[in-house]
Amino acid sequence: MADKVRDPVCGMEVDPNTATEAVEYKGKTYHFCGPSCKEAFEKDPERYLPEESHGCCG
Ligand SMILES: [Zn+2]
C-alpha cells in the first residue's frame, strides 16, 4: 500500500519514495511534485505549512 503525502504547495499527492524534490524544514521532510513547488516552498515555508502544528487555540 502506497504511503502518499501531500505536496504542501499545490496539494497534489506525491509518493515520497519516488518524489525527486524534498525539503527538510523544522525537522519535517516535505515532498514536492517538481522543482517549481519546491522553490515556492523554500521562499516562504510558513505560508504552505499545514495547520496541524499550530495547536488548539491559535
Ligand atoms: Zn506541486
Image (cartoon, rainbow, N blue to C red):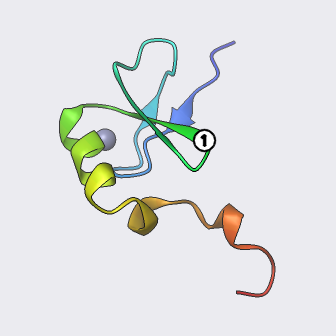
Q: Residue furthest front?
A: 26
In this view, 55 is above or below 17: below
In this view, 50 is above or below 33: below
Quarter of the picture containing the N terminus is top right
Q: Quadrant of residue 46?
A: bottom left
Q: Is residue 58 left or right of residue 49?
A: right
Quadrant of picture, ligand 1: top left
Q: Quadrant of residue 32?
A: top left
Residue closest to the eye, 13 or 17: 17
Q: Residues within 10 Å of mark 1 (few under 14, many from 20)?
A: few
- Residue 38 in the image: state x and y as whole percent: 29, 41
Q: For the point 40% across and 68% down, which residue is it?
A: 47
- Residue 53 in the image: state x and y as whole percent: 69, 64
Q: For the point 40% across and 41% down, which residue is it?
A: 12
Residue closest to the eye, 42 or 6: 42
Q: Is residue 12 left or right of residue 30?
A: left
Mark 1 falls on what kind of element?
A: strand
* Residue type beneath disc 1: Lys
Q: Residue furthest bottom?
A: 57
Q: For the point 21% across and 33% down, which residue is it?
A: 35
In this view, 42 is above or below 28: below
Query: Which residue position is annotated with label 1?
Result: 28
Q: Is residue 51 left or right of residue 7?
A: right
